[in-house]
Image (cartoon, grey):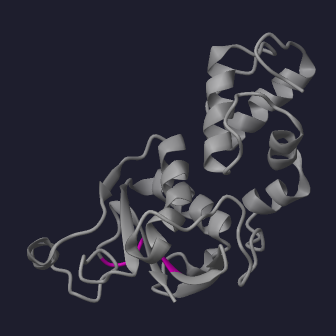
Amino acid sequence: MLNVGSRGSDVTRLQQTLASRGFNPGGADGVFGPRTKAAVQAFQRARGLGVDGVVGPNTSRSLFGSSDRKYYDGVSDFAPAGTNPGGLHAGGGWGGSQGVSDRATAIAHSMGVPVTSTKRNLADTIRVGSNTGSDHYTGNTNAYAVDYGVSGARGTELARRIADAYGIPRSNIGTYNRHTITVDGQRYSVQLLWQVAGHYDHVHVGIRRA
């Protein structure tokens, strides 16, 4: 177990691993201080773990275990289709789809990426050049969508992290394909849009109750 005040090579490894995941611990000096704690907490939020800033068994397994290596090595079987991916929960309205989006928002927040759009009324839907089939449209009461304002390599990193967290094949990035998952016993169709027409300055996550 590592927490504030811990020192040594294990802390150095922790800091290096956090940094490689995109969570800045403020350097790898082997001293578990406030910035390392904040990075651990951001990681815990992104992975749906208890947020206490302490690297106990669950956080350690998530950071260093085999599942985490799958999460980052390009293999997209972290959460196979039809399973309930860890850290996802339905709720919050829109047929539970808003709650399913919370994991993506936590990942974006951990990277410092803002939410730029959620649900839109009809006038705003037309204004942005969209249509009533969009998950953003308020008339679709069993759907929810979130846009995250980001571009370039950070957008690619965000899209990959979200894909892995939801069990979406990374090959879907750059396509309009949807992916079905089961969350709290209910099936949801998830669409991740990045580097397709109209999605070069934001990552879009659209979720529909199936």
Residue 193 visible at all? no
Residue 76 visible at all? yes
Name the side, left or right, on which 143 lies relative to 139. Answer: right
- Position of residue 67 relative to residue 119, above or below, is above
Residue at x 64%, y 15% (from the top left corner): 34
- Numbered label tally: 0
Residue at x 90%, y 57% (from the top left corner): 66
| Residue 172, horizontal then vertical, whole percent | 57, 81
Q: Find residue 152 and report its image quarter.
A: bottom left
Name the side, left or right, on which 66 lies relative to 35. Answer: right
The residue nearer to you, when weighing 162 against 16, is 162
The residue nearer to you, when weighing 42 against 157, is 42
Name the side, left or right, on which 191 lies relative to 146. Answer: right
Name the side, left or right, on which 16 lies relative to 166. Answer: right
| Residue 169, horizontal then vertical, whole percent | 66, 78
- What segment is highlighted magenta in the picture? 190-197
